[in-house]
Image: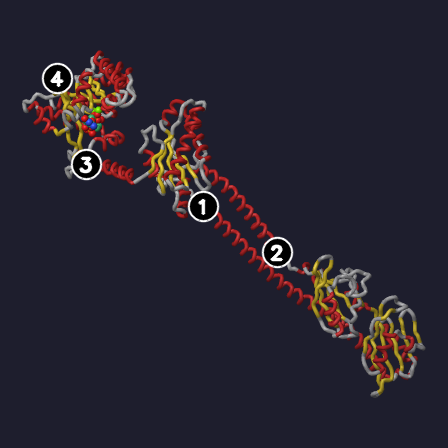
Amino acid sequence: MRNENINININEKKIKKQLIVITVIIIVSSIVLCAASGGILLYVFKNSHEAEHIQMKTEVMEYKNRIFKQMNKSMQILTTFANTCQVSGIINSKEKMENSIVSVNEANGFVSFAYLSSEGWGILNTPGYGIWRDFTLEDCSNEAGEAIKKAFNGENSVSKLFDSSVYHEKLFIYAVPVYEGDKVIGVVAASDTIEIFKDIANGNTVMGGQGYVHIIDDQGNFLVRSENTLVKKNMKSIFDGPYLSENTKNITKKMLLNHESMFGEFTYNHEKCHFYLESMGLNGWNLFCANKLWGTILPLERIILMIGSVLFIILLFMLLLLYYGYYKFRKNTSIILKQAYIDGVTGAKNLLRFSLEFEDFQKKHEDYSIVAINIHNFKFINDLFGNNGGDKVLRYIKQVIEKNLKEGEFFCRDAADLFYILMLDIEEDKLKLRVENIVRHVSETTRNAEYSYEISLYSGIAIRGDTAKALLAMQSIQRKLYTSVAVYNEELHENLRNKNSIERYMHTALENKEFKLFLQPKYNLQNNQLVGAEALVRWQKPDGTYRYPGEFISLFEANGFCLKLDMYMVDMVCRQIRQWIDLDIKPVPISINQSKLLFFNRNYVNDLLQVVNSYQISPSLITLEILEGVAMDSLEEIDCRIKELHSKGFKVSMDDFGSGYSSLNMLYQLKIDELKLDRAFLQKVSSADAERRKIILEHTISIAKELGIHTVAEGIETEYDKETMRMLNCDYGQGYFYNKPICAEKFRELYM
Ligand code: C2E
Ligand code: MG
Ligand code: MG
């Protein structure tokens, strides 16, 4: 089925499959690559969060330590002073106490420095404001009072922050008890500004500039806040505003109450930020460190992020490139496929495409028929209307076929004027009807169209067969103008097999001398004398049976083997004549059938002469028969050849005259010696309108006579035939009435 000559191995499905595989591979590897880089990034981010937590915690602890170091230092000063008071006895002298307070405060620079006796009196020194000598506990703020009371109870304490009316800023105090023996007899107190938290207050940052530390109380209120903080100035508490989620708020409140540390998250300007809360373990104070999450990403991570983005862009670009490539490839392949699969003249599928589809179709269906359609004499149409006209006809036929297809059927144009159709029907009658419909449609339309030339199609159908079988069926009616459809059957196949085996064996047969010379006598109708014989070939197979010319001559003419065979027959005839002469038998002229191929061969006459000369016989004993149809083809060339043959002494006879479309012009132009009237003439003469035919025959014979041409009646089978032809003035007769073709030996026995 597949046309072996077509080497284009493009399989559209295969290409599509490969494209899909490539696309899937690229997409999958892209996904894997993306996932891998995503994983790496995620890992890095997670680690960076941990690093961030550690860093936050470390920096906050550093702050805490610094604050506590400062507080301890101050507390140490107060404790030392309290001890000195005990030892030195200055507690007993207000004046001494006042001096000591002033000098200690000068040395250490507290905002104010005070001593309160358990007896109720007190002294307060505030540099720049002087000495308050009747200072009492009632003069202190609540926060300071509370711390002092704790000190009277024997506890070193630090107060909560309170507002100072003098300083207009928040202050706090340290308070340390003064003992006499085991008894607290007074308290030393010093107030300080939040100067010690100045790093925080000045807005110094942590976390490489992205973090801020605040001090908040256990309610979440800001006590000290960083200057450049994210937190808005009007915010009193970390719980104000929409920044912390409800959940985080609840957790944070709990942690504050329990003085515990925690990490958390809040949203600021649509960005996620982190915070860390560390209890200071003093007065409910806590350090609150807020940090912009993304700002903490280290340069390395930034590079990775960048690489990730670049990777993503590259992948995107690759996918785009792939898509573009795929698009281009599809476009190009579709052009190539079109060129490979479409017939350029009609736009129909070509045989390759048809074969591929048919292969597929066969896998799924059992019921179908292949129809081959061809145009009678397409060459003639091309000659008549030019190639463009021919192409137009082909396109028209394509349209007609297309219109007559059922759903699921398809067709193609093979070479020249050959179309194949796959039809879904399998009933012979239905198929014939459908094909005849196409044939009729084409012939009717063309008859009425501009060409005024009726195009006739012929067709072969192979039910459940293939293109070869359809072609075979079609070829079986190639020369039968009035049959338009043939259906493939085994007989046709047998013929084909036969043909193949003949072709395979013919050369060997010639070598083995299987082609035998048979002779059929030719008689003078007027006097019943033998005038010659016709040489007819018989193929005697090794088993002794015969093959007759009807089985192989047309095949040999088609494949050119006739050139050899006919010359072989000439040789046999000459040899036979030579034999007769050698036996002292007077030879009779013998006619030899010649294929048209020989007549168009330039060396033909020379070759003949060579054979004749080699047997040393006269060319006048040889008559060469050419078929009427051959002469029709090219009168001038044939005429030339006839003249040449005459010049060498050969005679020429025209065989089967009247079987085709004989023309009187031919008789006039070709100077032949003999006209063999086809057997059909005789048959027709004895039919219904015998009289009219007789007249034609009679005149043909008479014209021939006048032109100096002998006439031979073929197929004389009966006495009646003989008499008829004799009456019509025909010169000679040949036929079963006299004898069948017989072998040369028998011929000699009977006639010589
Ligand atoms: P043809 O040259 O017209 O030969 C006459 C054919 O009619 C022969 O058939 C012969 O047997 C047959 N015939 C003779 N008398 C009668 C008769 O009374 N009734 C009927 N029905 N038939 C008769 P054959 O031998 O089968 O040859 C057929 C054709 O094959 C020949 O027709 C000739 O054209 C061709 N042929 C035969 N031998 C050769 C050859 O060696 N070379 C070539 N090129 N063609 C040959
Ligand atoms: Mg003949
Ligand atoms: Mg004949």
- Ligand 1 within 8 Å of disc 1? The answer is no
**Separation of disc 3 and disc 1 at Cα?**
48 Å
Residue beneath disc 4? 527
Identify which amino acid the numbered label 3 is placed on. Thr
Circle 2: element type:
helix
Image quarter for ligand 3 = top left
> Along the polypeptide, which appears first: circle 4 or circle 3?
3
The disc placed on residue 508 is 3
Mark 2 close to ligand 1, CB under 8 Å: no
In depth, the one of 202 and 515 nearer the eye is 515
Say which of marks 4 and 2 sits in front. Answer: 4
Q: Is residue 674 above or below residue 269?
A: above
Q: Nearer the viewer, mark 2 or mark 3?
A: 3
Which class describes the residues within 10 Å of circle 2: few (<14), some (14-19), or many (20+)?
Answer: some
**Which residue in the rendered view is the most extreme toward the bottom?**
181
> Please, what secondary structure does the residue beneath circle 4 have?
loop
Reading the image, the residue beneath label 1 is 13
- 498 shown above or below 248: above
Say whether residue 565 is visible: no
Name the mark nearer the viewer: 4 or 3: 4
Residue type indicated by callout 2: Leu
Q: Please name the amino acid that badge 4 sits on.
A: Asn
Mark 3 closeness class: few <14, some 14–19, many ≥20 residues within 10 Å: few
Q: Which amino acid type is marked by label 1?
A: Lys
Name the disc covering residue 305, or none. Answer: 2
